[in-house]
Image (cartoon, rainbow, N blue to C red):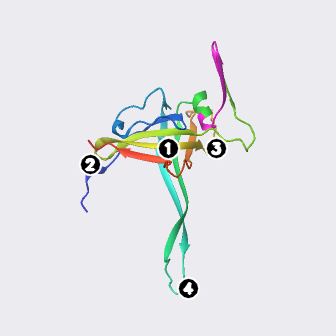
Amino acid sequence: MAVNTNNLIQGPATLYTGAFGATEPVDSAVNTTPAASAWTDLGGTQDGVKFGGDQTYGELEVDQITLRVGSRLTKQDFTIETSLAEATLENLSLTLNGGTSASGSGWKSFEPNVTSSATQPNYFAIILDGYAPGQFRRRIIGRRMLNTDSVELAYTKDKQTLIPAKFAVHYVSNSVAPIHVVDQTN
């Protein structure tokens, strides 16, 4: 197979967040910024944005054949991972999956949600806007997300403070896929 250099991708992505169930941009608008009324730009990131998929398969085997005779999907995990470079209270709240915010003249505050583990978390949606082959745009929409990784704010003399985030995709319904990927083609 010959190499098609038009299929090589390099460049940054932009992340947006919206409420779970927010109106998604239509596929034909893949090259436009999502509506600010429903989607908020998370700002700068550092060390890129990664979309990952992990699939676990159980083996099917029989005594008479030494090879795996089949596999069945037993688990799927999809994530969007980055380090948020803008260490705002809004980004901290997002990575801690919500909480209580307040503001007044010259100040704003945030307190994380510390309710019972039986309480439903505040799911949200994420849009990852990056590049596709041909220098076109690719949009990945995670429809029901939570940050499932540890959060830390490191204040050091010689390094930038970042908020690490690993947003995990969650099941939506039998009729709604949890992820939608669309590429611009012209």
For residue 70, above or below residue 148: below
Helix, strand or loop at mark 3: loop
Q: Looking at the image, do the residues carrying marks 4 and 2 touch, with CB atoms under 8 Å apart? A: no
Could you tell me which secondary element the residue under label 1 belongs to?
A: strand
- Distance from the alpha carbon under mark 1 to that under mark 2: 27 Å
Amino acid type, residue under disc 4 in the picture = Asp
Pointer 3 residue: 150
Q: Does 60 lie within the magenta span?
A: no
Disc 4 marks which residue? 63
What label does residue 142 carry, if any?
1
Asked whether residue 101 is drawn in magenta, I would say yes
Q: Quadrant of the C terminus?
A: top left
Q: Is residue 70 above or below residue 176?
A: below
Label 2 element class = helix
Mark 4, Cα crowd under 10 Å, few <14 / some 14-19 / many 20+, is few
- Residue 79, horizontal then vertical, whole percent: 52, 48
| Residue appearing at x 26%, y 48% in the figure | 6
Mark 3 or 4, which is nearer the eye? 4
